[in-house]
Amino acid sequence: MRAADLDIRKLLDVDARGGVVRFAGERAVILDAGALGTLREELVRLAGYAGARAVLTRFGVEHGARMAEAMVSRLAWDSEAELHGAGALLHTLQGFIRLAPGDTTPLASRGATLLSSYEAEQHLLRLGRADEPVCWMLAGIASGYMTRATGEAVYVIEDRCIGRGDDVCHFQGRTRAAWGGALEEHLPFFRDSDLDPSFGEPAQPAPRRTTGRALGAKASALPFAAPRGEPPAPLVAESPAMQRALDRARRVAPVDSTILLTGESGAGKERVARLIHGASARAAGPFVAVNCAAITETLLESELFGHARGAFTGATHDRAGLFEAARGGTLLLDEVGEAPPGVQAKLLRALQERQVRRVGENASRPVDVRILAATNRDLAADAAAGRFRRDLYYRLRVIEIRLPPLRERREDVLPLARALLGAASRRLDRPVAGFTPEAEGALERHGWPGNVRELENAVEHAVALARGGVADLDDLPDDVRGAAPTGGGGGEEPAARTLEGVERRAILAALERHGGNQARAAAELGIGASTLYRKLRRYARGAG
């Protein structure tokens, strides 16, 4: 049989009555690509880039090996080359990839080029543009398939990727000996027993397992595992408010409109801006951010629009501005509400005319850039009061996305704290795996006026001070450790006049007496620790 003769209709068997799907004789399931994208996003959030890559690579190896086993056992191939080429074609038929014309196998001297990859597309959509190739599962699938098809361990590595801004994805497959030292940085993501040509035979137990911490240490040279490779603040959206904000961001990302991101300082506006850029048609272009509040008016104008040589003291050469530097990509005007009036006028002209004029020049230069703006100010009120140009406000606010403060998304606090804990423990090389219930209770009770940025600092504080494998209440900053919800400075809450309100006040008073220690407070109140914990969770969500 030849690879070109493969017909997915003959390989796919669907029993509609029994609800069983088989592919090449093996039980299969049909998964939505978006769901797999969500899985990737969650793996990165929970395990970091290095951990997510390891899981998806190893899953891919297993999938590819099983597929090759089915091809070998069920079909008679004209040649080994046809069996090799069948792998790439199978994955094209299954919707994983679109192979470049003429390419059949990553073992070829020129490798294999993909014109599209579902994995790269989902990574861009969910996590934004990466610094390294991200088709981890596809590389694993190809490795497992080629290992089983050739009878020797083959490692397929991606060296170009749409997910990091390349025009195509490119894979090269070689044996370990042929790769030589170039393979060393990739080996931590494969299990020692994964690429075993004798697939299907009982595997010998591995002499040792690579722990998550060891994996992070082995892969420390990779951008994904280095601190800078970690997302600055994971996008956690358990709460309906944050889910709506991210849903809107993903929906408008492909449309080249100007977007105004509003929300308190530290709420994650730049992270969402990066998500929008990564999910847009400009993902292959640069993402450039400038803080309009951090630069004086003269320097800000030069930073944004550039300057000519001799335009002012110290201008010793021509210099392009950020509008030009972001050509083909996205420019984020952070804290745009702080831009001085003179810069506001020039920003308006640049947005209207899609041209910029360098300081000291008379000629304008066309620019092709998408503008995102972010502010923690009420720009509508500022525009009404004359503190911000009304016409610029409407130019920026084609689409507005409001990011809720952390106190309005209580459901996100603990998942976000756990994700930040994983990143901090890797960054500080501290084996801290979680929080005690007392620490989690304090995290939920705190008001988080500094939002995600404050939470990130509190988590790093806890990781740095933790004595063992979990962060305890005493490891948190003082203001977080002593947090307890109150009715405010004035009159009582309406709930305080009810029986439930009396109970709540008694619980909070007991916690205060015992310095936030839930076990001692529960003992004093005569209730179980789990009961107290459930009540505190309800209070933290505003349901009490």
Image (tube, grey):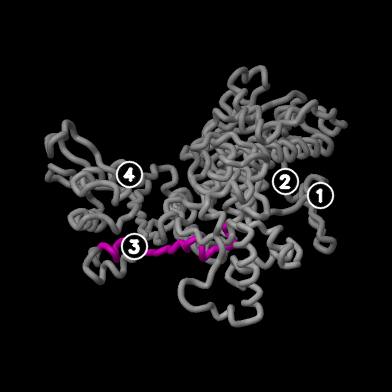
Q: Residue at x 66, y 30 (%)?
A: 214
| 349 w.r.t. 156: above or below | below
Amino acid beneath label 1 = Arg
Amino acid beneath label 4 = Arg
Q: Residue at x 70, y 65 (%)?
A: 532
Amino acid beneath label 2 = Asp
Tag 3 secondary structure: loop
Q: Alpha-carbon distance for marks 3 and 4? A: 28 Å
Query: Nearer the observer, disc 2 or disc 3?
Result: 3
Q: Quadrant of the N terminus?
A: top right
Query: Nearer the observer, disc 2 or disc 1?
Result: 1
Q: Quadrant of residue 52?
A: top right
User: Are there few (<14), some (14-19), or many (20+) residues within 10 Å of tag 2?
Assistant: few
Query: Nearer the observer, disc 1 or disc 3?
Result: 3
Q: Alpha-carbon distance for marks 2 and 3? A: 59 Å
371 left or right of 281 in image = left
Of the numbered discs 2 and 1, the one sitting upstream in the chain is 2
| 483 w.r.t. 177: above or below | below
Q: Quadrant of residue 361?
A: top left
Amino acid beneath label 3 = Arg
Of the numbered discs 4 and 1, the one sitting upstream in the chain is 1
Tag 2 secondary structure: loop
Residue 377 in picture, x, y percent from top left: 34, 62
Q: Residue at x 22, y 57 (%)?
A: 344
Query: Nearer the observer, disc 3 or disc 4?
Result: 3
Q: Are marks 1 and 3 in contact (CB under 8 Å)?
A: no
Can residue 98 be seen by looking at this rendering? no
478 left or right of 370 in image = right
Numbered badge on residue 27? 1
Q: Alpha-carbon distance for marks 4 and 1? A: 49 Å
The residue to which callout 4 is attached is: 327
